[in-house]
């Protein structure tokens, strides 16, 4: 085929979105599952991250050392390797029936908790020492000062970094398609094979992801500006 | 009912005593190293392309001319706000239909990862350039330097020093991202580990080995960024 002919063929490519939009409910289900994995990972990841952060800040060396190790390990290994480990390896080690959903939620809860822990730690450490001393002076113990004095102030500073990480998490959940969890990416692969329209399917899905993530990032930017105006420094 | 539960518990205990089989991993070490070579190769290509094009796009985002600024902004927003896996798969399955260009797994992964890196690093460069006091620009102008001279000789050297930790962090992200190339069947560490796991029925050892491998490679670099951050903070103060 000559270059000219080839060129004409490309020009003649007929976009056909009908095949995609007639099966849009499949993609909608995928989108719902993507949001489901993300929110479950947040639900478990946030408390776990807080526990890791507090442990890492602990003066008890074995505790802070093991928390540091967990955090660094999950931050430096690729999420796809972690997902494969939880999906293929863990069920052999402990006798449980592993489903794609459990493996996905497990992986992303732990993975994001490692990142959240560092954000929480930065926030807690950014609070002036005088606040701890003040709390101690009026007779509060460690947990009381943490809960009533430190965390309420730290949380405000953590919000921008926290939201950025949550958006990162939302993007990373596309990996769950590789262990056959029916998220948006998986549904896209499925639909592309069924309709023989990969160009349209993947473009529509990319646009869907873009809108979803773009909206979240704009909201997080808005909140960040609000916080900056209220004179709150941010932690990164 | 009771015995059922007991049998299950017993089975669970029995399976907990997993016979570790790291021998096959050591036997297959050369295979894993072939994979690591693929990982390092795609990392080098994507990090070089991504960080250099990112600099150009980052400077364009700072341009006064909106016909330069807007396309750069669009590029950054598109690639920052879509998952990198979607980008790789789009380049593998959709891009060839659109353009007629043959895309192999390597090219698809390189396009996806380096454009993603470009978008993220452009924001880092932009933040670095914007962090320089306007006085520096004025000083450059005062001694008769043009825009590009000021940028090259005064602004960039200082900005690059400030953003070095952020760029190193990006590099670490790219190294981890390279595992995604396995999804379009590019040969790298994870795909080799999967092969070893499937052939020897030892997924625990194979995937643990890969996790440790990545940790061993990246952990010293992470520590380096901490040192870098501390020294830069000290020298800035």
Image (tube, rainbow, N blue to C red):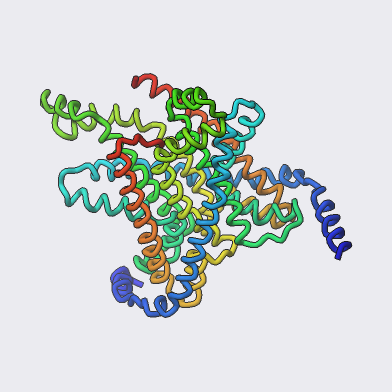
Q: Quadrant of the C terminus of chain A?
A: top left
- Taking the image as shown, residue B164 lies to the left or right of residue B141, namely right
Q: Quadrant of residue A181?
A: bottom right
Q: Which one is in front, B182 or A100? A: A100
Looking at this view, is B217 or A1 the one in front?
B217
Q: Residue at x 64, y 26 (%)?
A: A61
At horizontal 34% and vertical 75% (from top left) the residue drawn is: A15
* Coordinates of residue A124 in the picture (x, y in percent): 47, 33
Residue A171 vs residue A47: left or right? Answer: left
B169 with respect to B214 (left or right): left
* Residue at the right extreme, as displayed: B3
The x and y percentages for residue B105 are 49, 57
**In the rendered image of this protein, does residue B59 appear above or below residue A109?**
above
- Give the x, y percent position of residue B47: 42, 42
View extreme (front): residue: A138
Residue A87 placement: quadrant: bottom right
* Image point (41%, 76%), residue name: A20
Depth check: give the residue in front, A223 or A1.
A223
Nearest to the observer: residue A17 or residue B21: A17
Residue A72 in sight in this render: yes
Quarter of the image with the N terminus of chain A is bottom left
Number of marks drawn: 0
State whether residue B38 appears in this view.
no
The image shows residue A54 at horizontal and vertical percentages of 56, 34
Q: Residue at x 56, y 30 (%)?
A: A142
């Amino acid at each position: 085929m000559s270059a000219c002919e080839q060129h004409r063929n490309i020009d003649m490519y007929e976009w056909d979105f009908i095949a995609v939009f007639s099966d849009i409910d499949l993609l909608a289900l995928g989108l719902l599952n993507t949001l489901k994995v993300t929110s479950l990972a947040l639900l478990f990841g946030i408390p776990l991250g807080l526990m890791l952060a507090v442990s890492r800040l602990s003066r008890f060396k074995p505790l802070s050392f093991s928390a540091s190790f967990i955090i660094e390990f999950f931050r430096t290994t690729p999420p796809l390797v972690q997902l494969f480990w939880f999906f293929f390896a863990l069920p052999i080690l402990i006798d449980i029936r592993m489903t794609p959903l459990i493996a996905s939620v497990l992986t992303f809860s732990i993975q994001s908790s490692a990142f959240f822990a560092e954000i929480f730690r930065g926030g807690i450490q950014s609070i002036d020492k005088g606040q701890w001393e003040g709390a101690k002076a009026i007779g509060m113990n460690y947990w009381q000062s943490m809960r009533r004095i430190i965390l309420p102030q730290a949380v405000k500073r953590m919000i921008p970094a926290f939201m950025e990480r949550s958006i990162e998490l939302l993007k990373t959940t596309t990996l769950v398609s590789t262990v056959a969890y029916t998220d948006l990416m998986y549904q896209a692969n499925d639909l592309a094979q069924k309709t023989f329209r990969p160009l349209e399917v993947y473009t529509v899905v990319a646009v869907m992801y873009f809108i979803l993530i773009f909206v979240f990032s704009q909201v997080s930017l808005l909140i960040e500006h609000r916080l900056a105006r209220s004179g709150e420094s941010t932690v990164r | 009912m009771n015995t059922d539960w007991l049998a299950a518990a017993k089975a669970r205990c029995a399976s907990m005593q997993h016979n570790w089989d790291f021998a096959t991993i050591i036997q297959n070490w050369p295979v894993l190293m072939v994979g690591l070579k693929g990982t390092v190769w795609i990392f080098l290509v994507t990090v070089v392309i991504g960080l250099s094009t990112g600099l150009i796009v980052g400077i364009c985002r700072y341009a006064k001319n909106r016909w330069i600024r807007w396309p750069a902004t669009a590029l950054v927003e598109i690639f920052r706000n879509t998952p990198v896996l979607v980008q790789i798969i789009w380049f593998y399955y959709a891009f060839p239909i659109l353009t007629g260009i043959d895309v192999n797994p390597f090219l698809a992964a390189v396009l996806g990862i380096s454009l993603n890196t470009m978008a993220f690093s452009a924001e880092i460069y932009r933040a670095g350039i914007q962090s320089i006091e306007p006085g520096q620009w004025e000083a450059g102008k005062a001694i008769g330097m043009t825009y590009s001279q000021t940028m090259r000789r005064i602004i960039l050297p200082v900005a690059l020093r400030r953003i070095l930790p952020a760029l190193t962090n990006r590099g670490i992200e790219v190294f981890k991202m390279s595992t995604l190339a396995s999804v379009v069947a590019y040969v790298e560490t994870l795909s080799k580990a999967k092969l070893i796991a499937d052939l020897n029925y030892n997924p625990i050892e194979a995937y643990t080995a890969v996790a440790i491998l990545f940790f061993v490679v990246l952990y010293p670099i992470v520590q380096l960024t901490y040192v870098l951050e501390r020294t830069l903070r000290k020298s800035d103060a």
